[in-house]
Image (tube, rainbow, N blue to C red):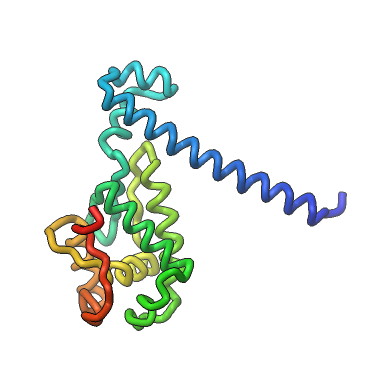
Amino acid sequence: MPHDPIQAAHALSRLQVAESRFLEAQEERRQAILESVRADVPLREVAEIAHCSHETIRRIVAADGAVTIEFGDHAYPLPGQTVDLLVYKLAGHSRGAFARDLEVLGAGSGWLAAAGALADELHAGVADEKGKPVRLDEARAFALHQVLRLTEMTRPSSLFSLAKVLRDKYGYPPYPARSLRRWSLSQAL
């Protein structure tokens, strides 16, 4: 049977829609689980309705949007709000939404694809019931470093520690020119 490009495009379009719906349903399920547990429904009852083990429910509640980033031999657990902010910033950079910031950073644009990939991995990590950490390779670490250079952190945290490790590795100053409007985690949270 010859390859029909219209049929292939239609099939891929259906797959994209199905994947989007699947991810939305997965997030809706996670939120419903969290709401049920917060309403004091016993874990075993929630697990029965969700068709999973009560240990899975316990992990979902414990994570509540948190993701652990691994870099080198260290793990950096990040709370859900911090992960959401990083996903926003990484994805925005990869789509070119922060062109002025890119100029100020002076690090070129080669890291933008890795920023998008890391945003996708962090987003998936939020819904991961197993709590699998996101491991930074060199490209993703450099992309995260660029985003963190524009993030003012005023309190000690796992993200602050990770930013320091990345800053030491890549040798850039923690914050670029003072005239740049910086994102502040303390303001965002």
Quarter occupied by residue 18: top right
Q: Is residue 67 visible?
A: yes
Residue 79 rendering spot, x and y as whole percentages = 25, 48
In the image, 89: left or right of 77? right
Quarter occupied by residue 62: top left
Residue 169 rendering spot, x and y as whole percentages = 24, 73
Q: Residue at x 37, y 34 (%)?
A: 31
* Residue sitting nearer the eye, 7 or 2: 7
132 versus 70 height, above or below? above
Q: Residue at x 16, y 56 (%)?
A: 157
**Residue at far right of view:** 1
In the image, 171: left or right of 96? left
Q: How many marks?
A: 0
Q: Residue at x 26, y 70 (%)?
A: 182
Quarter occupied by residue 114: bottom left
Residue 139 rendering spot, x and y as whole percentages = 39, 69
* Residue sitting nearer the eye, 19 or 68: 19
64 versus 164 height, above or below? above
